[in-house]
Image (cartoon, rainbow, N blue to C red):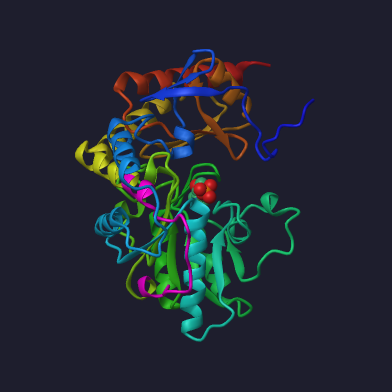
Amino acid sequence: MKLSPVMNTYQRLPVTFSHGDGVWLFDTDGKRYLDSLCGISVTNLGHNHPAVTEAIKHQAESLLHTSNLYHIEPQQKLAEKLCALASMDSVFFGNSGAEANEAAIKLARLYAHNKGNSQPALMTMSNSFHGRTLATLTATGNEKIKVGFDPLPTGFCCATYNDIESAKAQFADSANNIAAVLVELVQGEGGINIADTEYLLQLQQLCHDNDALFMLDEIQTGNGRCGSYFAYQQLGLDPDVVTTAKGLGNGVPIGACLAKGAAAKTLVPGTHGSTFGGNPLATASALAVIETIETKHLGERVTQLGATMKSAFESALADNPAVVEIRGCGLMLGIQLDRPCAQLVSDALDNGLLINVTAGSVIRLLPPFILSDDEAEQIVSTVVKLINQFTTAA
Ligand SMILES: *Cc1c(COP(=O)(O)O)cnc(C)c1O
């Protein structure tokens, strides 16, 4: 077989899409698919959303890029908007989730150094996912993605997710010098695992007691995916740092690291940067995304649709003993089976539906916020049919 000139880093499904329209994607043979994945929670407003397209067109006609050697108007506006939405004080813009987390990790280290802690550690959780760069894969709580990449950076330690005693033990271990904790409120790649609110509040308190930064990775849960703009806003949490990316630009690459209080003043000229980060095109697109979420009240819609879909799954799958648990936060839905079920992704594709399976046995749905009631029902009935066929076969 001829070697593809694209480096072989992805296992790809046998389909190529030529265009999209709202919740639909069309392949090169003209077959249409209901997109219940949104490119992993990126195109949350659907494909070719008119407000986003218009903002991109308008920006492309005036200015694409200048570098951060100069002031950038839409970047300034987006930073103001995000800070107001999230009650944070400042934002650093990168181009991806991993870059947003890199900024958070560097911020935490510099914050610690400024206090005289010259060997700070970052605590992250089992089953977590924080990215694929060297620092973010080291932070990730999954040994498989680290294999072959030694030597890894030092200054990281890991606690068991959703287990406050484990976090306390890491803080108590004098070999660690924990300067910050980075945690996902819902682990997306890890299998739609939802942290208990009480655990998160205790973890935040533990950070305060130890003068460590409480940092949330909202790269997947943010930008309306769980109903509120950031998921932490539903839980009464008060983080020092929040990272996001995925849905922020609806497909235009952009990542953001938001910070509050002393953390917001840590990174100063010369300590961090990015050529593309926060460029006019990406920030104009993100401004249009946020404006659309606000003016169309998509947060409320996500909460309502998510609850409706979750209970529809619960009643339709109640009699299937292979279904272990159905979990959800807004339109971030996971159905855990008692067996590996990657096969369901191809079955769904054959049925004109895009879904994902993560952590081996968890069906993950991340549908667009603009879904109609009928389309939501269509997703539920197709997924239920496929699960029942799959779990009763052989
Ligand atoms: C996707 C994701 C990342 C990495 O984002 P990239 O844009 O792929 O670098 C980090 N953290 C979480 C929680 C994610 O879901």
| 98 or 329: nearer the viewer | 98
Residue occupying the far left of the picture: 295
The image quadrant that residue 261 belongs to is bottom left
The image quadrant that residue 377 belongs to is top left
Q: From which residue to which does the magenta span run?
A: 264-284
For the point 53% across and 56% down, which residue is it? Answer: 161
Quadrant for the C terminus, please: top right
Residue occupying the far bottom of the picture: 116
Q: Is residue 108 above or below residue 44?
A: below
For the point 54% across and 54% down, which residue is it? Answer: 130
For the point 30% across and 23% down, which residue is it? Answer: 372
Looking at the image, residue 355 sits to the left or right of residue 14; the answer is left
| 392 or 177: nearer the viewer | 177
Looking at the image, residue 339 sits to the left or right of residue 29; the answer is right
How many numbered markers are drawn?
0
Magenta region's main secondary structure? loop
Residue occupying the far right of the picture: 1
Is 275 magenta? The answer is yes
Residue 40 x, y percent position in the rendering:
48, 38
